[in-house]
Image: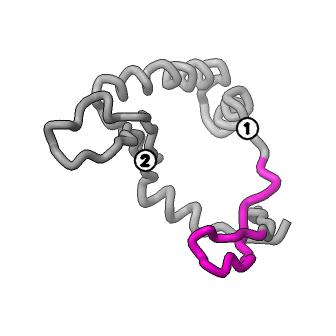
Amino acid sequence: MSLLYKVSAIISHFDPVQKTRYIARPCNRTIIDTDQMSRIIAERSTLSRADIAATLYAFEELIPELLLQNYSLHLKPLGIFSLSFKSKTEDDAEKVNAGSISEIKLQFRPDTKLKKEINKAKLQKG
């Protein structure tokens, strides 16, 4: 199966000429939910769909719980989930405090194996 892309026009606001340029963007993506993923995994394993769904829903509760306890979560062979901050800068270290943080961001760093599999993708204009 190929990954589909479309051609999109962009204008860089950093370019003084603001010339229109073109890039490739993914297109025609469809969302697969937990139930659908559970069915696929059940077909490929000896586990029931219900057991798989229960495990996935347990992750829904456990992941934020552990992240909020300052853990980074390494789900081999997928990757690492962690938190980062969007914070305003200060000239003096003493001025940086919890109020400096404007957003808590969820980060995901894929494992090498997952990145290699994704990079094997064939591409096709959609």
Residue interval drawn in magenta: 9-29
Task: Tell whether 70 sits left or right of 123.
Answer: left
Name the spot of residue 81 as percent of width and height, x first. Answer: 41, 40
Which residue carries the number 2 mark?
Answer: 79
Could you say which quadrant of the image residue 11 lies in?
bottom right
Name the spot of residue 88 as percent of width and height, x first. Answer: 34, 43
Q: Residue at x 16, y 43 (%)?
A: 93
Q: Is residue 73 above or below residue 1?
A: above
Task: Tell whether 84 sits left or right of 4.
Answer: left
Name the spot of residue 116 as percent of width and height, x first. Answer: 51, 65
Task: Tell whether 33 sits left or right of 71.
Answer: right
Name the spot of residue 79 as percent of width and height, x first. Answer: 43, 47
Q: Is residue 28 above or below residue 51?
A: below
- Give the amino acid at mark 2: Gly
Could you say which quadrant of the image residue 87 lies in?
top left
Residue 32 shows which numbered tag?
1
Q: Nearer the viewer, residue 38 or 118?
A: 118
Q: Residue at x 36, y 36 (%)?
A: 73
Q: Nearer the viewer, residue 102 or 31?
A: 102
Give the Cα separation between the discs numbered 1 and 2. 20 Å
